[in-house]
Image (cartoon, rainbow, N blue to C red):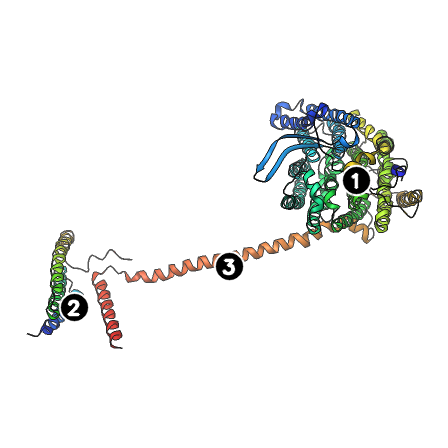
Amino acid sequence: MIGTGAAMLSDSAPVLQPLAPASGVFAYLWVLLALPLFGAAVLLLGGRRTNRWGPYLGCLTVITAAAYAIALLVSMMALPADERAIGQSLYSWVAVGSFQAEFALQLDQLSMVFVLLITIVGSLIHVYSLGYMEHDVDRRKFFGYLNLFIAAMLLLVLADNYLLLYVGWEGVGLASYLLIGFWQFKPSAAAAAKKAFVMNRIGDVGLSLAIMLIFVTFGTVAFDSVFAQAGQASETTLTWIGLLLLLAACGKSAQFPLQAWLLDAMEGPTPVSALIHAATMVTAGVYLIVRSGAIFDGTAVALTVVAIVGVITMFLGAIIGSAKDDIKKALAGSTMSQIGYMIIAAGLGPIGYVFAIFHLLTHGVFKANLFLGAGSVIHGMDGQQDMRRYGALRTAMVVTWLTFMCGYLAIIGIPPFSGFFSKDDIIHAAFEKNWIIGVCGVLAAGITGFYMTRMIIMTFFGKARWEDDVHPHESKPVMTIPLIILGIGSLFTGAALVYWGDIVGWLEPVTGLQEEPLAIPTIALEGITLTVVLIGVAIAIAKYRSTVPVEPPPGNLLTVAARNSLYDDAINDALVVQPTYALSRGFVTVDDRVIDGTVEGSASLVGGVSRRLRLVQTGFARSYALLMVAGAILVAVVLVVVRLS
Amino acid sequence: MNPESYVVLACVLFTLGAIGVLVRRNAIVVFMSIELMLNAANLAFVAFARMNGNLEGQVIAFFVMVVAAAEVVVGLAIIVTIYRSRRSASIDEPNLLKY
């Protein structure tokens, strides 16, 4: 492994870094959140008055935040390694008896890299959106939502306790819902937004239960106190917390079994897919697990489940990505698969935390690049998303093609580009822990090579299969310049983080690091992985080199299944939706028959009896007198009989 | 004279009164029958007071007389009012207050 090859075989647990008070450039940490929040407020509350200049304000706030984030990074690098965790308490947020939650921010090495990813990639995508959404009547609202998302995501990674993290977590969910359904006049987009929201809710229930369990166990929700006490809790408790956190991560990061929403989320505008559903929000689950590393360290069971979920999703995503003809859905499958890698790395424990974050960063850059490239293609093809209608676009869209190739080389992991470093590190770490996971990682890398090559060939090579009235054209500079920057980033982020940024040494104080000797030499493992990837590439070339039919061929059983997203909707429908419907119908029947029956039955009984009894009231005084006499005689007879007996 | 004879007389009077209430239609006659029943009860009270040798039955007889006098005032007023509006003292005709 190149990244850590020079380092000694060493184990280090995460040291609990004391939070230094925010001073100097860090004193304005809250501004980082306030900037995009201000932008969102102005754009969403300002109404039509801000239509003309609103989008530019939206870009400006995020770019300013990015510049400030870079200033923070420079200052943080100047600090000694064990003093890099900065805390800033803004005010006491919830104070009820023993339950205390501060509105407090925490900027450590882990938050820092996230802040950089969110603000820098976010800035590029904002600028790109200026071009992509140019003709949309609601683009002010679009930029308002994007700013809201950036603010919520920053809150998520800067929070210093679980409750505040939960606010950010819900905030990004809301922004995601609003942006998936941005074109809500399309029924499919409205349905996709609702689906994403509902499935995320399942994960959110997991997170809220985890937070409650954490509070019950540790008496606090602040990160530093919880992690300091994590060793004292029983393993069962830690396992439950870990599994609930995993459920939360599954919802947000579209991991098995809550993965079905991500493909539909592609109904949103492409910049949204790039920012939220590829680069940042969907990786929040990985952040949550790595951040809670101290909890997962105490529970081998939860870690194993995490790794298994990662392996399953990695293959699911890769298989789906190999068969989809919609370019965005193919990329979404790829995103699921790559996040699967990260979850696997997180599930390896301290061996893998660092590499999960490393892959998250490189993936954030190259997947944003790929999605924006796909957006540029879709833009040039008048909204056509079917790759079978593409072909030969490399001549028509040179810049898009070249930048897409950068992302391509990065994701399949050709040395010395980004994916090579980060993915091989994960595979290496997997072999250190468990060779089965390692082999799975290598196989999935091969499938990655296959589906990405397929996408490249179908889109940019071969014969043109355009529809008659489509005239593809290169996008404007406002879209291509972010693409070029991200393309360069895709190629070199990995190398830069390893050789210049020392990502492992940077994150080690937060995540800890553990290395174990490996039977086979690193270089051999890299060779094997690369060979498998190239085999995948070769299969794709062999299969798609000749003509690609416009109508999808029938395909074998696996292809058909993958085209249908492995029937995830059908399975969810059969396992959850229909039983829920049946249960509801049962409840309705019980309500109608038993409860309403009892109430209405007793009412009609009383009513019926009264209807008959009231006939006694004839209105004739003498009949009443007769009744009285009869009653008196009856009482007298009874008295006499009782007395006599 | 044997006090039990008064009790028997009271029973006969009471039965006559009850039958009168049940079979007569004229409100005045019904009213008189009720008076007969009340006085039968009075007679029984007094007879029992005599038989038991205390005064409680006689005191209650006075109470019954007072209540009967009050009842006559109200009852006759109602009967007169009904007669004025309907030109009839039949007790069966005012039967609107029913189911």
Per the model, the C-alpha gap separating discs 1 and 3 is: 61 Å
Residue A634 x %, y %:
25, 70
Residue carrying label 2: B19
Give the answer, above or below, for where B14 lies relative to A268. Answer: below
Find the residue positioned furthest to the bottom: A645
- Residue A52 lies left or right of residue B26; in this view the side is right
Q: Residue at x 21, y 60 (%)?
A: A621
Q: Marks 3 and 1: in contact by CB < 8 Å?
A: no
Residue B94 x %, y %:
20, 56
Per the model, the C-alpha gap separating discs 2 and 3 is: 54 Å
Q: Quadrant of the C terminus of chain A?
A: bottom left
What element does badge 1 sit on? loop
User: Mark 2 Cα within 10 Å, few/some/many (few <14, many 20+)?
Assistant: some
- Amino acid at circle 1: Gly
Question: Is residue A393 visible in the rendered structure shown here?
Answer: no
Q: Quadrant of residue A630?
A: bottom left
What element does badge 3 sit on? helix
Residue carrying label 3: A593
Q: Please name whichever residue, A117 or A357, is drawn nearer the observer in this view of the structure.
A: A357
- Amino acid at circle 3: Arg
Task: Name the subunit of mark 3.
Answer: A
Residue A238 x %, y %:
70, 48
Per the model, the C-alpha gap separating discs 1 and 2 is: 109 Å
- Amino acid at circle 2: Ile
Residue carrying label 1: A512
